[in-house]
Image (cartoon, grey):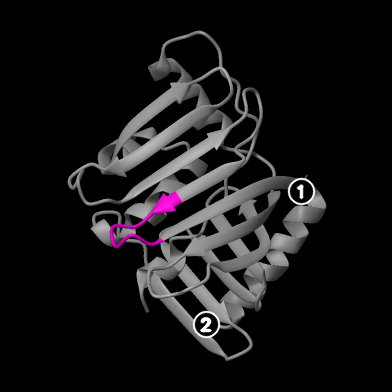
Amino acid sequence: MKLNRFSILALLFATIFVNGVRADDSLSALMQRMRSEQAVRIAYQETRTLALMDQPWRGSGYMYSLPPDTMLKEQLQPERLLMAIVGGDMYYYDPGNDVRHQAALDEDNPMSLNIAVFKALMMADRKLLERMYAVDFSVQPEQWVLRLTAKHEPDSGFGIEISGLPQQQPKRIVVEQADGDSSVFDLRKDAEGGEVAADAERLLQELLDSEQ
């Protein structure tokens, strides 16, 4: 399995408050506010631009955060797929073709760069974020922007940009791969709380049962 199957696991949530303090302080506040004590569901639409395809690939579905350490993605279109990071393990399940994979999330592997960011943000793990990425956080009048590049390979062409309107949750994630491929996620917070937690647990059970 190619790890980039998991590069699109993105569970970003909670309101981001920006103010006039230093960027360093704003980043700390952002990291803390991107962690939720409740289960959260995010509706997403994804557009992938691939060098080997004439037309962009489009998909949609839901992303879930399930504290303390689980992220799930249920792709509904163009076909149903389940993906998750549970602790330090990654899971993938294609129920239509009965294809399943499991792999460890290796934080020291450069191929895991675009996976580790989501774990770091969800766990408010700033040390992990800054160990693996060069971090640039800026506040502009119309939006805030968090830019991440490969710390040990700054010229690789890989980068992640997360942005949102002032005092609102993240609205867009752009992932640029070193080979020129890219993915754009447009996000909308859909729901949170007990019912979302129950849905996430059901999906997680389906995913983990597939590994039995």
Whether residue 150 is situated above or below residue 45 in the rendered picture: above
Residue at 60% x, 80% y is 209
Which residue sits furthest right?
195
Predominant secondary structure, magenta span: loop
Mark drawn on residue 190: 1
Q: CA distance from mark 2 to mark 1?
A: 29 Å
- Could you say whether the residue bearing mark 2 is in a helix, strand or loop? loop
Tell me where residue 165 appears, x and y as whole percent: 62, 28
Out of 13 and 145, give the one closest to the viewer.
Answer: 145
What's drawn in magenta, residue-wise?
175-181
Quadrant into which the C terminus falls: bottom right
Which residue sits furthest bottom?
97
In the image, residue 9 lies in the stretch drawn in magenta: no
Which residue sits furthest top?
20
Residue at 43% x, 58% y is 182
Out of 69 and 62, give the one closest to the viewer.
Answer: 62
- Badge 2 density bin: few <14, some 14–19, many ≥20, Cα 10 Å: few
Is residue 87 shown left or right of residue 196?
left
Amino acid carrying label 2: it is Glu
Tell me where residue 100 appears, x and y as whole percent: 50, 83
> Residue 196's image quarter?
bottom right
Quadrant into which the N terminus falls: bottom left
- Badge 1 density bin: few <14, some 14–19, many ≥20, Cα 10 Å: some
Mark drawn on residue 211: 2
Q: Earlier in the sequence, mark 2 or mark 1?
A: 1
Amino acid carrying label 1: it is Asp
Whether residue 202 is situated above or below residue 152 in the rendered picture: below
Whether residue 119 is situated above or below residue 136 in the rendered picture: below
Is residue 190 shown left or right of residue 95?
right
